[in-house]
Image (cartoon, helix red, strand yellow):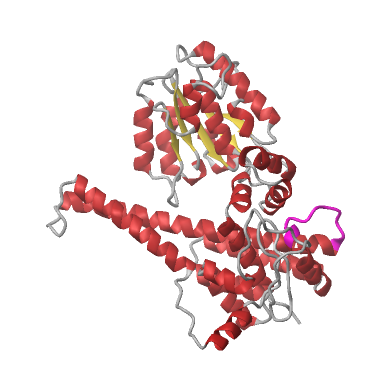
Amino acid sequence: MSVFDELVGQRAVRAQLEKAAAAARELAGKTAAGADSAMAQAWLVTGPPGSGRSVAARAFAAALECTGPEPGCGQCHACHTVMEGKHPDVESVATRGVFITVERTRELVGRSYVSPGSGPWRVVVIEDADRMLERTTNVLLKAIEEPPPFTVWMLCTPSPEDVMTTIRSRCREVSLAVPSPQDVADLLVRRDGVPPERALDAALAAQSHVGRARALATDAQAARERAYILTETLSIRGAGDAVLAAHRILNYSPEAAEALLGPAASFDAGPRAGEAGPQADHDGESGGRDGIGSGSRGGGRGRNSASTAKSGKKPAKKKSGAKAVSDALAAQFAEEEAELRRSLGVEEGGRVPPAVSAQITALREDQKRRATRAQRDRLDRALVDLLSLYRDVLTVQLGADVALVNRDFADRIAEVAASTSAEQSIRRMDAISQARTRLAGNVAPLLALEAMMVGLRPQG
């Protein structure tokens, strides 16, 4: 077993990194790698989201630190600790905020000049290099241009254009491609024990994004959220529905999914779409549940209202998904602040010295950035799912001989394709793309979603 086994559908990249790791053993920090060497001390790992940039960087780091007979053996202590994120000489940076700060980068640069403690190399992996501002990358420039003989930098970014030219020109580039859905499905079957059909459904729905596919195949809540968002959008009939749908998607909760889709089926026992299974009556319509979510056709709120009327009980007030997430983050942030206060010797309720106050303010600003990043990522993931839905509709309308991304919604996709035109589908895809741009530009999420949903409503 090799550390590169989880690098899906990247044979050329795997060969390049294995060759570099073999060359690195000869260098072992004794001298800087030359331009003609297979090994370099600064790497730019590029590829679309989900292609495995972080996996490639982590596997290469493990191969560099490997003590087995072949670099990246996957069996030695060094390989295990790197892959588990516990190796003392390998540091991986994945920002939870909107961008990587100058202060964080300066810390990395400073530590890059410290000799490795247990392995031959000190490896620094920046997973979100595209989130560095120009002044931040300027801090990196000197360290990448003239690194110590024992330091290797790896910057991960979707595209080479996402980093400054001065940085890009000093790095050895590794370009990853989007793996095929079947390759991703095979990985889920082999690594996670997912049933083959569910694995392929998840790989298609995730558009070959390995991490997203794993979530859809193994996390029932992730699959339910996706099904809810698609079903809610397909239920829009007018402007009023559009505004309400925007609010519901922004404030998603598992309770809302149960009201719309019916009770969740177990992943282990859940039937595939089209097979016999639990049916839920949604305003006279029904739909089976597949292995990664529900393709039911909406309207489930009426059923729950009827059962409530029969019992004579008022439904319990539930927290929205956004509120629940907000509460969870608030609790986490409060604990972080309490820990910082304790480490600085500030008693609870005591006076906060100015120097400590500045540190607490900095922590709160970082927490605010992390909360913004978490919300943006969740909404962007939802919009990518919607974009794939109307891509499927357009595919059917044009008669293209390609697989549907959302196989569990095949019946609904066929209905929409038959009742609308290709021009309408393109306009809807444009509305979703515009919403993604607005969210990235810091437009209020609810306003961006409302404008998008109004653009998705049936015309005429």
Residue appearing at x 45%, y 77% in the figure: 317
Left or right: where does residue 150 sit relative to residue 176?
left
Front position in the image: 196 or 239: 196
Left or right: where does residue 222 sit relative to residue 401?
left
Residue appearing at x 21%, y 45% in the figure: 343
Percent position (x, y) of residue 431? 65, 67
Percent position (x, y) of residue 125? 48, 34
Percent position (x, y) of residue 420? 80, 73
Report if residue 182 is visible in the image: yes
Front position in the image: 188 or 126: 188
Left or right: where does residue 255 sit relative to residue 99?
right
Q: Quadrant of residue 454?
A: bottom right
Magenta region, mostly helix, strand or loop? loop
Percent position (x, y) of residue 340? 24, 48
| Residue 399, magenta (yes or no) | yes
Q: Quadrant of residue 139?
A: top left
Decide: is 249 above or below 129: below
Please identify the quadrant where the C terminus is shown.
Answer: bottom right
Please identify the quadrant where the N terminus is shown.
Answer: top right
Report if residue 153 is visible in the image: no
Residue range (magenta):
398-408
Residue, far left = 351
Front position in the image: 340 or 280: 280
Decide: is 441 above or below 1: below
